[in-house]
């Protein structure tokens, strides 16, 4: 169920090597809108085996553990997200 939305869009730039090598110069970053949703299902309901999967595995994590696990170029965005939603986590 819907809990909250961050009032501002958050942006990050990809590392230069990713822009040229992985994205072939097509993208240089992202602008994101963040929502906090409450999951009422079971772990078995989470499906990441899509036609073009972005992830190979998933797990529940505490917010501070997420910050310690995220790639460095996304860390500032995740700090803003967690700070913005912390009262509801």
Image (tube, grey):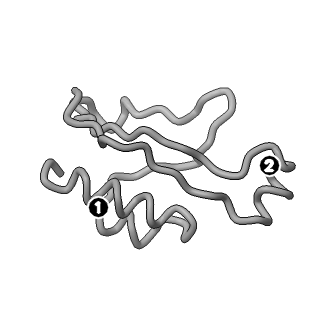
Question: Disc 1, disc 2: CB below 8 Å?
Answer: no
| Residue 50 left/right relative to 35 | right
Q: Is residue 37 above or below residue 11?
A: above
Residue with the mark numbered 2: 23
Pointer 2 local density, CA inside 10 Å: few below 14, some 14–19, many at least 20:
some
Name the residue located 33 percent from the left edge and 37 percent from the top edge.
35
Q: Quadrant of the N terminus?
A: top left
Which image quadrant is residue 66 in?
Answer: bottom left
Residue with the mark numbered 1: 63
**Residue ranking furthest to the front:** 8
Q: Secondary structure at mark 1?
A: helix
Name the residue located 76 percent from the left edge and 65 percent from the top edge.
16
| Residue 48 left/right relative to 52 | left
| Residue 6 left/right relative to 21 | left
Camera-near label (1 vs 2) is 2
**Pointer 1 or 2: first along the chain:** 2
Residue 49, horizontal then vertical, whole percent: 58, 33
Q: CA distance from mark 1 to mark 2?
A: 29 Å
Q: Is residue 39 above or below residue 68?
A: above
């Amino acid at each position: 169920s819907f809990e909250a939305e961050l009032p501002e869009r958050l942006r990050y730039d990809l590392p230069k090597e990713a822009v040229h090598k992985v994205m072939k110069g097509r993208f240089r970053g992202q602008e994101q809108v963040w929502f906090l949703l409450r999951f009422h299902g079971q772990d078995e309901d989470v499906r990441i085996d899509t036609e073009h999967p972005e992830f190979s595995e998933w797990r529940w994590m505490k917010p501070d553990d997420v910050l310690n696990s995220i790639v460095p170029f996304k860390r500032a965005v995740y700090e803003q997200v967690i700070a913005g939603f912390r009262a509801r986590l």
